[in-house]
Amino acid sequence: MMNEFNTAREFLIKKFGKAELIKPGTYPVPCNTSRGKAFMKVIASNAGYLSDFHLFKDEALTISWYLEDQEKG
């Protein structure tokens, strides 16, 4: 989980310039997985906390990365 947090934080700092300037909202953070490229959903709160970290296949965060696994299972 620490790797996901660090990846998201680094991406958002590049986007906003400083950690203090990260605006609350939901962001698609590009990342690489063992099965290819994905987007990690990250929610930034008013208090500056980052949460969620679920993977999606698309930048719009509409196609779950896990959907294929659920259908097989």
Image: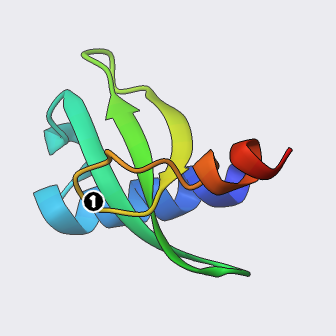
Q: Residue at x 54, y 42 (%)?
A: 53
Residue, far top: 47
Instruction: Count residues near mark 1 (Cα–Cα under 10 Å), then give few for <14, some for 14-19, many for 20+.
Output: some
**Residue 11 appears in the picture as rendered:** yes
73 versus 9 height, above or below: above
Q: Is residue 39 left or right of residue 65?
A: left
Residue, far right: 73
- Image location (x, y in percent) of residue 1: 73, 47
Q: Residue at x 26, y 61 (%)?
A: 59
59 versus 43 height, above or below: below
Residue type at the position of mark 1: Ile
Between 43 and 59, the one lying in front of the other is: 59
Q: Residue at x 56, y 55 (%)?
A: 65
Q: Is residue 10 left or right of residue 20?
A: right
Between 19 and 45, the one lying in front of the other is: 45
- Image location (x, y in percent) of residue 34: 73, 81
- Image location (x, y in percent) of residue 27: 26, 46
Say how the picture is coloured.
Answer: rainbow
Between 11 and 73, the one lying in front of the other is: 73
Residue, far front: 72
Task: Give the labeled residue for mark 1.
Answer: 13
Q: Is residue 47 left or right of residue 3?
A: left
For the image shown, how many numbered marks are present on the structure?
1
**Residue 17 appears in the picture as rendered:** no
Q: Quadrant of the C terminus?
A: top right
Q: Residue at x 16, y 63 (%)?
A: 15
- Image location (x, y in percent) of residue 3: 68, 60
